[in-house]
Image: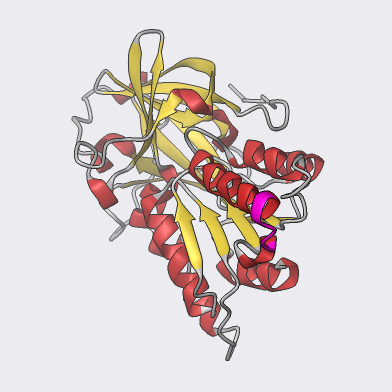
């Protein structure tokens, strides 16, 4: 089964693939999936992470298989022949996730996804980015970027890329960032700070950032303060509960006061199709995670 779903730009909607582990439903953004296939035996990798089940070669490339029940500490089951593999493509890597069943696809609004309660879902260590109610069931949206980063840290954001940029001046220009992953939000903040951008405000979703911008817009129009004194650039993820990065970009670029703000989309989903979407909405730059060094360079170029 291949997935080939492309939503309209800026509608604040997404397609969720519902899958189960130990009969518990979870969700993944369809945009992350390249293929769904029946489970196949894999070749173990000696001395690898316990959650790496092994590798297999479905066609022309070797794919690493992550055992999701094992990572989440659920029972793995005895009969793998009924299990499924979700092959994903994001962060410029391809990984297969071993799950028990794949149920189907549902189209929902990001505003229908609630942010997880930090106490119930592990706080900063949570692998949940949201909870959606679909057909009467609560579906936990999984933070697959965090899982991959936990299992293979070398694939995530590398602060050494900032060091490679060399000596940098300190900048007080205000930068707003939005990312629903607690881990990535902290790493982006740390990386920008190390790069000299010390006036950063971080938000956990696009709606929070938009509410903040709306308050700034009011001050700009009513009090005449310069926009760039309050915000000089916006860096946003695409996947976020309440409001995604595409809808946020659309709102900014359609606003006569805010439209001059540079918007940089920094997401694991950036590919050719997403580039077209982002450009149509007015995004000034689009970069794939985890290219943090390139993000800083792009910010240097576009900041007001």
Q: Main secondary structure of the magenta part?
A: loop
- In the rendered image, residue 220, in percent from the top left (x then y), is placed at 67, 54
- In the rendered image, residue 42, in percent from the top left (x then y), is placed at 39, 40
Image vertical order of residue 217 relative to residue 152, above or below: above
Image vertical order of residue 226 relative to residue 172, above or below: above
Question: Which residue is at a point 34% across and 55% down the rendered structure image?
Answer: 150
Q: Is residue 64 left or right of residue 176?
A: left
> Residue 11 occupies which quadrant of the picture?
top right
The N terminus, quarter of image: top right
Q: Is residue 153 left or right of residue 288?
A: left
Question: Which residue is at a point 70% across and 68% down the rendered structure image?
Answer: 303
Question: Which residue is at a point 63% across and 67% down the rendered structure image?
Answer: 229
Question: Which residue is at a point 74% across and 71% down the rendered structure image?
Answer: 301
Q: How is the image coloured?
A: secondary structure
The C terminus, quarter of image: bottom right
Q: How many marks?
A: 0
- In the rendered image, residue 258, in percent from the top left (x then y), is placed at 72, 50
Instruction: Point out the residue furthest to the front here.
Output: 223
Q: Is residue 270 visible?
A: yes
Give whichever of 285, 217 is nearer the camera: 217
- In the rendered image, residue 199, in percent from the top left (x then y), is placed at 51, 71
Q: Is residue 75 left or right of residue 227?
A: left
Image vertical order of residue 123 relative to residue 189, above or below: above
Image vertical order of residue 237 relative to residue 135, above or below: below
Instruction: Point out the residue furthest to the top here.
Output: 135
Q: Which residues are magenta?
A: 222-226
Give whichever of 198, 136 is nearer the camera: 198
Query: Is residue 223 on the magenta stretch?
Result: yes
Q: Is residue 37 visible?
A: no
Query: Is residue 142 on the magenta stretch?
Result: no
């Amino acid at each position: 089964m291949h997935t080939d779903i492309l939503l309209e730009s800026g509608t604040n909607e997404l397609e969720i693939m519902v899958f189960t582990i130990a009969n518990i439903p979870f969700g993944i953004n369809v945009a992350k999936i390249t293929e769904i296939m029946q489970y196949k035996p894999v070749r173990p990798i000696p001395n690898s992470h316990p959650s790496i089940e092994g590798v297999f070669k479905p066609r022309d490339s070797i794919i690493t298989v992550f055992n999701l029940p094992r990572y989440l500490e659920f029972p793995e089951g005895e009969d793998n022949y009924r299990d499924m593999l979700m092959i994903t493509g994001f962060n410029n890597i391809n990984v297969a996730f071993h799950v028990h069943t794949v149920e189907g696809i549902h189209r929902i609004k990001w505003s229908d996804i609630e942010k997880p309660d930090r106490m119930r879902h592990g706080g900063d260590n949570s692998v949940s980015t949201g909870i959606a109610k679909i057909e009467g069931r609560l579906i936990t949206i999984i933070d697959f970027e965090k899982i991959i980063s936990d299992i293979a840290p070398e694939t995530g954001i590398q602060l050494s890329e900032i060091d490679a940029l060399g000596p940098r001046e300190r900048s007080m220009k205000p930068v707003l960032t939005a990312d629903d992953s607690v881990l990535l939000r902290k790493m982006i903040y740390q990386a920008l700070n190390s790069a000299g951008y010390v006036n950063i405000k971080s938000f956990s979703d696009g709606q929070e950032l938009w509410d903040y911008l709306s308050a700034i817009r009011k001050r700009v129009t009513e009090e005449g303060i310069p926009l760039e004194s309050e915000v000089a650039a916006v860096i946003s993820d695409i996947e976020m509960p309440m409001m995604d990065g595409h809808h946020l970009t659309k709102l900014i670029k359609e606003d006569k006061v805010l439209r001059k703000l540079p918007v940089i989309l920094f997401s694991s989903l950036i590919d050719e199709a997403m580039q077209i979407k982002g450009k149509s909405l007015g995004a000034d730059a689009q970069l794939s995670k985890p290219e943090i060094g390139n993000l800083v360079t792009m910010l240097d170029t576009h900041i007001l």
